[in-house]
């Protein structure tokens, strides 16, 4: 696993990533969002964790407090949704997986321009809570706290 010069751990886990689709490749990693496994696109330009409509339809919001409404401009157009705090687990094929709390945008169910969009791991309120590195030669995504 990756270490600092001092010997301290930089990363406690790693996983192979996918780089698809060929026409417009995105770096995707397997994660669990509140216990539901899904592929998420790593996007450091995106704010928050942005749930796909498919993932959002599987989450149980009855036990969660909505933070507020939110509008986000994306390449798919303007997205309207609600902010929640969700638990995300990065799944490791090497080392240990880690779990963090992330701020998530859950699109409103009628957001048709978001219909085919994937789940995104954005920087603000999500990836900023951990260390991560990408090794393109080994196609690995490293992560740690």
Image (tube, rainbow, N blue to C red):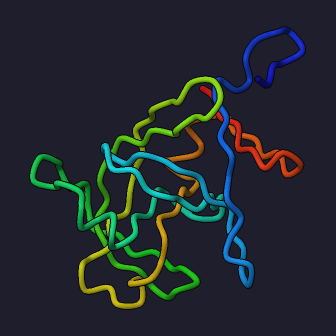
Question: At which x and y percent is residue 9?
Answer: 73, 17
Q: Quadrant of the N terminus?
A: top right
Q: Is residue 58 left or right of residue 124?
A: left
Q: Quadrant of residue 27?
A: bottom right
Q: Quadrant of residue 115?
A: bottom left
Question: At which x and y percent is residue 110?
Answer: 25, 86
Numbered circles on residues, count: 0
> Which residue in the rendered view is the most extreme toward the left?
62
Q: Is residue 119 left or right of residue 108?
A: right
Question: At which x and y percent is residue 113?
Answer: 41, 90
Taking depth in this image into account, of 37 and 83 the one nearest to the observer is 37
Q: Is residue 124 above or below residue 45?
A: above
Residue at x 53% of width, y 30% of height:
97
Q: Is residue 55 above or below residue 123?
A: below
Q: Quadrant of the C terminus?
A: top right
> Which residue in the rendered view is the most extreme toward the front?
93
Residue at x 44% of width, y 56% of height:
38
Taking depth in this image into account, of 82 and 91 the one nearest to the observer is 91
Residue at x 52% of width, y 39% of height:
90
Q: Is residue 135 left or right of residue 21?
A: right
Residue at x 82% of width, y 9% of height:
7
């Amino acid at each position: 696993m990756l270490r600092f010069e001092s010997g301290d751990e930089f990363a406690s886990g790693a996983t192979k990533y996918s780089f698809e689709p060929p026409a417009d490749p995105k770096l995707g990693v397997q994660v669990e969002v509140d216990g539901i496994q899904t592929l998420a696109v790593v996007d450091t330009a995106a704010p928050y964790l942005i749930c796909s409509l498919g993932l959002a339809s599987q989450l149980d919001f009855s036990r969660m407090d909505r933070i507020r409404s939110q509008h986000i401009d994306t390449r798919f157009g303007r997205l309207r949704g609600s902010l929640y705090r969700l638990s995300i687990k990065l799944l490791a094929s090497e080392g240990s997986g880690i779990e963090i709390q992330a701020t998530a945008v859950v699109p409103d169910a009628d957001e048709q321009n978001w219909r085919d969009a994937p789940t995104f791991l954005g920087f603000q309120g999500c990836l900023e809570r951990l260390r991560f590195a990408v090794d393109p030669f080994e196609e690995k995504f490293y992560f740690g706290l």
